[in-house]
Image (cartoon, grey):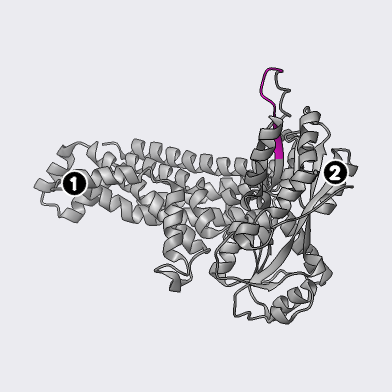
Amino acid sequence: MMLTQDVWEVILLSLKVTSTSVLIGMLAGIPIGALLGLYTFPGKRLIVALIYTCMGLPPVLVGVLVYMLLSRYGPLGSLDLLFSAEAMIIAQVVLVTPIMTGLTMAAVHGKERAYWETAKSLGASPLQLMLTIIREARGGIWSGVAAAFGRAISEVGAVMLVGGNIEHHTRVMTTAIILETRTGNFSAGLQLGLVLLAISFLFNSFLMVGMMNQMKTGQR
Amino acid sequence: MMKKHFRFVTSFFLLSLILLLSACSSQAPQQSSAAAPAPAPAPEKTAPKEITLATTTSTQDSGLLDYLLPIFEKQSGIKVKVVAVGTGQAIKLGEDGNADVLLVHARKSEDEFVSKGFGINAYDVMYNQFYIVGPPEDPAGVKQAKTAKEAFGKISEAKAAFISRGDDSGTDKKEKSIWAEAKIKPADSWYLSSGQGMGETLQMSDEKKAYTLTDEATFLSRKLNLAVMMQGDKSLLNPYGIIQVKSSAKKEEGMKLIEFFTGEEGQKLIGEFGQKEYGKGLFVPDAKKR
């Protein structure tokens, strides 16, 4: 594959949309997940069940819902966001936030309560408690980031619907692969697919290396 | 601590990405044959006869095949598997031997397909027409144009939004040929390429209040706030051809299908299709051996 200007553009847009979505998903999902992992309250079970369900949301369904929301005839039509990079980010945030929340919650659950019992007895504020527990559970949280990134970058149903695969505007790697295959250009589709795989592999390798280092240095 | 670590991770990640990609780009482009699937093995004698028809999305989306094929299957006892894709991929399927018969609409590519020795027994089957459609208020004044060429000229002058399919389909090729005729290279922010099928592209035009070139059948089968700006110009005719794939192992069955489409009864059915719903047939039959 010749890495033309166009191919670069597609790769960069994929990375931009995905990393933005994952960052927003982390900002929302990690604190919520930590709180759910730390505290019990009435109705918590229902919320947890809902979060686990949303971890497996069909991307196409999210795509349809966001499409209807942003359509010119929909409730948010005046924003004129349909078929834009922002629309793709909105759809992907909906997809990755539950993953971040659910996996953070599981990671926090898996930690010894003794840690934060101690912190609490030392007079830590709820915020300090949360930060402590997030630091303690970071291994599990990083794997949540990996899962969210993998889901976002390889997802095609939602970004095709709400982004529209418009050249130079919303064409990302997955939608470009579909287009190449549809036009009978199998080898280009395959090569783009391999680049996609390589990006996922690299990203996960870094997380792994980073996690290993953290585990080593962060051990008490 | 976390922040620093994150920065380290991202910079490292990007660096290796660049290394990886530059390694990719230095490779020579490989032949597509590596990725092309192997042709299907010949079926056993006992299996029910089944052939694959590669066609364009327009014949499928308009419902024409759902109307014709059951009748053919009843008469002949041959099952037809339909693969509806863009003309570009349909022809590729034929070249790779993954289809027995093609029903497509891109005359130039069809002729190449036959002359390169991939296809035999090519027939004209029917034609319909393309429309130029757009927002009813017609900001570019396309309705005043006399020809398709002139209409496209007005759109580019007004820099009115135009959505191209950009998927190498028959409709896409037609659109590109009109731009070429008008000697305009559309490559500005008003010209968007969706890389999707006709239905999705019409939907996008509706959302973005843009002009587009569409086949008649798909347009009539959708309910959208788009109006026909131009029809009936000679350059907007859209002829369909049916071709047998030379490497097909089921020549006899494939020929039966071609005979049905170009024969008296098939032609009559094609002409009648859509009359009830739209008050006019969606396709005009004109069978003729090429």
Of tags 1 and 2, which is closer to the observer?
2
Q: Give the letter of the chain under mark 2.
A: B
Q: Is residue B236 left or right of residue A80?
A: right
Q: Indicate whether residue B127 is drawn in magenta.
A: no
Q: Could you say whether the residue bearing mark 2 is in a helix, strand or loop?
A: strand
Q: Is residue B284 shown to the viewer in this render?
A: yes
Q: Residue at x 88, y 38 (%)?
A: B117
| Magenta span includes B48 | yes
In the picture, the disc for residue A93 is none
| Point 70% across, 67% down: residue | B131
How far apart marks 1 and 2 lie (CA) works out to 67 Å
Do the residues bearing badges 1 and 2 touch, measured as CB atoms within 8 Å?
A: no
Number of other residues with Cα within 10 Å of mark 1, as a class: few under 14, some 14 to 19, many 20 or more: few
What residue is pinned by disc 2? B122
Q: Quadrant of residue B83?
A: top right
Residue located at (43% from left, 59% from top) = A66
Q: Is residue B253 above or below residue A77?
A: above
The residue pinned by badge 1 equals A44
Identified by mark 2, the residue type is Ala
Q: Secondary structure at mark 1?
A: helix
x and y percent of residue B154 in the render?
Answer: 73, 79
Q: What amino acid does circle 1 point to?
A: Lys
**Position of residue A14 measured from the top left corner of the image (x, y, whole percent):** 54, 53
Rendered position, A180 above or below B257: below
Whole-percent x, y for residue A103 in the image: 32, 42
Compared across the picture, whether B207 is left or right of B278 comes to left
Could you tell me which chain the residue with mark 1 belongs to?
A
Which image quadrant for residue B266?
top right
Left or right: A151 as drawn, with respect to B215: left
Residue A101 versus residue A210: which sits nearer the camera?
Answer: A101
Range covered by the magenta-colored residues: B45-53
